[in-house]
């Protein structure tokens, strides 16, 4: 069994490493998970078989087809991770937490097969998925589990987490989700790990998360607010959030369809994502930006015609250069900022 990571190190599923070894890092992904919407899971449908004839329909209507949200094949995940490595990638942060079927042993095997560094998350997803795991547990009990996952490892695996989250927040927050967020702050204080959050879809939710964490004594410079792609659409909204000292995460890269099944909004494409990031850079928030894909469906994997985990190092970096992002700016977003956040404080 490997030892726990110390301050100044990164806790990966195969043990502690130095932050300089991470390379290009995807801060919000799922290699193994089950994010099937509860209503769909309740119907008991067989898993969808993706073919050339239906791949567009499944990809476009991504919440309508049972099985699309289940990533449970370690060999396939390792092959997809290897494609990321071949594209120049180094590290994938898997933020699959209680409620969406985390698999620490599977993550370790993916690292062994692919050569990609993997950092695992600990915590709890939104209550509609994680109600059984959250239950009536107290703040201290929830915090103790997250702390143990980082210090000792998940249950009896000896495989340790390296980030707290994605911690799930709904609209409005449930009482249980507030307990989880309070517990996440306690775990951050105890371990020096970063918190990463799945905010509610209301545009005020990211600000509410930032204020809650600050009032609870958390370190907002080590607080990542994800899914800005579906939550904040105007420059002034983005700058108002980043002015709270948090890290903004655009993690829908590769989703080029405007259709979003959970709200009446138009998702941006990669070009628009980069425009908002460019505005944040111009406003002086370069150290508060990270990006990712949030892959959690099979139709986004290369095997089924998707962009895969290699999209950012292969395609988005090229787009950033065409849009006059400097090499130091690209490195800051993809390498330096993730390294700071994944290094235990």
Image (spheres, rainbow, N blue to C red):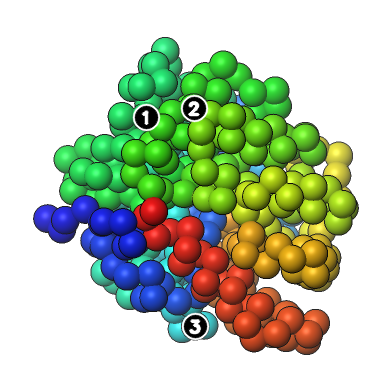
Find residue 143 and name its label. 1
Residue at disc 3, secondary structure: loop
Q: Cα distance, mark 2 to mark 1?
A: 8 Å
Residue 304 visible in this rendered orientation of the protein: no
Task: From the viewer's side, name the closer residue of 306 and 344.
Answer: 344
Q: Indicate the position of residue 239 as horizontal and vertical percent values.
A: 79, 53
Q: Residue 256, located in which quarter of the rendered image?
A: bottom right
Residue that appears at 34% across and 39% down = 190
Distance Cα–Cα, label 2 vs label 3: 37 Å
Q: Can you give x and y, in whole percent of width and height, for residue 12 in the image? A: 32, 60
Residue neighbourhood size for the residue with mark 2, other residues' Cα within 10 Å, grouped as few (<14), some (14–19), many (≥20)? many
State which tag comes first along the sequence, 2 or 1. 1
Q: Mark 2 points at which residue?
A: 182
Mark toward the start of the polypeptide (2 vs 3): 3
Image quarter where the N terminus lies is: bottom left
Circle 3 is placed at which residue position?
88
Q: Answer whether labels 2 and 1 touch (C-beta < 8 Å).
A: yes
* Separation of marks 1 and 3 at Cα, in angstroms: 36 Å
x, y percent for residue 47: 52, 45
The circle drawn on residue 193 is: none
**Disc 3 residue crowd, few under 14, some 14–19, many 20+, Cα 10 Å:** some
């Amino acid at each position: 069994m490997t030892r726990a990571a110390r301050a100044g190190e990164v806790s990966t599923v195969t043990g502690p490493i130095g932050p300089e070894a991470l390379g290009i890092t995807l801060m919000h992904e799922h290699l193994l998970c089950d994010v099937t919407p509860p209503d769909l899971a309740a119907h008991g449908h067989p898993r969808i078989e993706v073919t050339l004839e239906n791949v567009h329909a499944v990809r476009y209507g991504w919440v309508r087809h049972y099985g699309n949200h289940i990533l449970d094949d370690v060999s396939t995940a390792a092959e997809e991770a290897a494609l990321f490595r071949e594209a120049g990638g180094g590290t994938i942060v898997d933020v699959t937490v209680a409620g969406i079927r985390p698999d620490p042993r599977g993550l370790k095997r993916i690292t062994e097969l692919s050569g990609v560094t993997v950092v695992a998350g600990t915590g709890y997803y939104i209550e509609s998925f994680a109600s059984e795991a959250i239950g009536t547990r107290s703040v201290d009990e929830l915090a103790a589990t997250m702390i143990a996952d980082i210090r000792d490892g998940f249950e009896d695996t000896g495989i340790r987490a390296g980030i707290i989250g994605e911690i799930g927040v709904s609209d409005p927050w449930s009482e249980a989700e507030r307990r989880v967020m309070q517990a996440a702050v306690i775990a951050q204080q105890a371990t020096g790990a970063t918190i990463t959050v799945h905010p509610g879809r209301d545009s005020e939710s990211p600000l509410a998360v930032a204020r809650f964490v600050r009032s609870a004594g958390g370190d907002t410079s080590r607080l990542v607010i994800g899914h800005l792609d579906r939550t904040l659409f105007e420059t002034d909204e983005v700058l108002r959030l980043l002015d709270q000292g948090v890290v903004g995460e655009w993690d829908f890269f590769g989703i080029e369809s405007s259709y979003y099944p959970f709200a009446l909004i138009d998702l941006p494409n990669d070009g628009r994502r980069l425009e908002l990031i460019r505005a944040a850079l111009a406003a002086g928030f370069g150290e508060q930006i990270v990006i990712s894909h949030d892959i959690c469906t099979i139709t986004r994997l290369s095997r089924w015609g998707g962009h895969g985990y290699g999209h950012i190092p292969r395609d988005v970096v090229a787009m950033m250069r065409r849009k006059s992002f400097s090499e130091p700016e690209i490195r800051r977003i993809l390498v330096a900022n993730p390294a700071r956040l994944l290094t235990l404080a």
